[in-house]
Image (tube, rainbow, N blue to C red):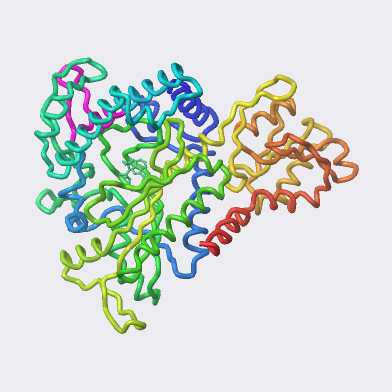
Amino acid sequence: MEQREDKLKEVISHAKEYGFVFPSSEIYDGLAATYDYGQLGSELKNNIKTYWWKAMVQMHENIVGIDASIFMHPTTWKASGHVDAFNDPLIDNKDSKKRYRADVLLEEHIEKIRQKIEKEVEKGLKRFGDAFDADQFRATNPNVLRNAEKITYIEDKMRVTLENNDLEGLKNLIEELEIVCPISGSKNWTDVRQFNLMFSTEMGSVAGDASTIYLRPETAQGIFVNFLNVQKSGRMKIPFGIAQIGKAFRNEIIARQFIFRMREFEQMEMQFFVRPGEEMKWYEYWKNTRIQWHKALGLGEQHYRFHDHIKLAHYANAAADIEFNFPMGFKELEGIHSRTDFDLKQHEQFSGKKLQYFDPELNQNYVPYVIETSVGLDRMFLAVLSASHKNEVLEDGSERVVLNLPPALAPYKVAVMPLTKKDGLPEKAREIIDGLKFDFLCTYDEKDSIGKRYRRQDAIGTPFSVTVDHQTLEDNTVTIRDRDTMQQERIAIADLHRLIDQKVNLRTLLTVNTMSEVNN
Ligand code: ATP
């Protein structure tokens, strides 16, 4: 656990030191759970967006993208259920004045009991050695059984109270389990209150005209309200998708863990409209396609797993998360939801407009069913950054910090360095950059020893470093160093473009995606 926390701290400080992510308005001591992407961070973020947009929109004939506004008519959020039901139950400790999510307090309590079970199993293993049968031990050991029963009891009570919106029941459960505040250690709790996660503001400058509007808590509704506009103007035929990348806002009660949980964040969402009755086929299809998109990045397949939802949201008939092994453990990276016809039907009802599709093959009108894929851009960023960040001990015993970023996502593709600052080498280096800069983001560096400059590029994940030396002036060759293998090769300047392109072109990643979709 401690090791994991250290890893997260390392990633945070690396991100700041090299210009990837800064705390927002830091000169005023920052603002909780808001961050700014720096000069390299915004490049990495843009590259992730491009990878998603290309794979999801531009490589699919039947998916188009839109860019809807953040402000929407307030009735949108009535219809979607967010005004009434987008709540988290919160509770305060009167002594520490700290605020918690009641459901999270209970989940953490359950996790502690789970850890007790695991300790018991470990003890058993130590005692009985090779002869130990863990499954049998779990099924028969009285301590394990008692704790497992406790967990079932708490989970059942939690489910009932949450489903019935029974806030008093939640508080009673916290008291019954004698849960204490981790800060004050006391059981002095307030009542549980529902807390709506939407930010609201006023529109219009005249007080009387003002009406409450919300900052969208998800981008999906911008797609639903435009369903007919896009379908008609784009002559889209079912099945088809509408995609969007954009900001979303949630007033999260506890926002910790760096850019994993922010109050202002960015989502990449796609709603896929299908015939009623065909949604399960497409749900499986998108689960598969999306996990392949992640795995194609090469961060390690062991970092991903599916988590099927047990308790479904009111609008869904199936839902799964793609979880990623973040420094804090496996957590949700992307959600894939079968949303039925809930959203379109709600908007039909609240707007009085028909949101239906005429299916020429069936000769019939219907409200389409929807499969949604929704991934957090900032969580993607954290996944890529944390899995790429490595402290390596080299063969000669020295150490280096390297970001093994997928080359197509790396901010700079190539660094060009003159060996010395004189003899026309800088001019030659700049000439090489001029030839490459139309296709690749390049950086120039002439300060410090070559070794130091390589380390700097390793730390920001630049896949290639090119060095210009005196021989270059004679025969137009340079050395090119690979970030991952650290091997250097002497090649003709004329071959640079092709060699770099082979490795950093997004085409490589997209080809893996196309192949896996064919097999889907
Ligand atoms: P969680 O359970 O972690 O709060 P969620 O289930 O509420 O997430 P969704 O409503 O399914 O999340 O949103 C889709 C995606 O948006 C998530 O998979 C996640 O990547 C991203 N996301 C949601 N909330 C945040 C946040 N506060 N900060 C950053 N990304 C977020």
Q: Indicate the quadrant where residue 485 lies.
A: top right
Residue 486, visible in the rendered structure: yes
Q: Is residue 346 above or below residue 428?
A: below
Residue 301 placement (x, y as % from top left): 54, 43
Side (left or right) of 441 relative to 131: right
Q: Is residue 390 above or below residue 214?
A: above
Residue 346 placement (x, y as % from top left): 19, 63
Quadrant observed for ligand 1 in the rendered image = top left
Residue 189 placement (x, y as % from top left): 14, 23
| Front position in the image: 173 or 396 | 173
Q: Residue at x 22, y 36 (%)?
A: 155
Q: Which residues are magenta?
A: 89-112
Answer whether residue 414 is magenta in the image.
no
| Front position in the image: 311 or 130 | 130
Answer whether residue 111 is magenta in the image.
yes
The quadrant of the image that shows the N terminus is top left
Q: Indicate the quadrant where residue 359 lies.
A: bottom left
Q: Residue at x 22, y 23 (%)?
A: 98
Q: Is residue 137 above or below residue 471?
A: above
Q: Indicate the quadrant where residue 183 lies.
A: top left
> Farthest residue in the front direction?
131
Q: Residue at x 25, y 71 (%)?
A: 355
Residue 376, visible in the rendered structure: no
| Front position in the image: 492 or 150 | 150
Q: Residue at x 31, y 39 (%)?
A: 263
Residue 363 placement (x, y as % from top left): 31, 84
> Farthest residue in the right direction?
474
| Front position in the image: 499 or 32 | 499
Side (left or right) of 167 relative to 361: left
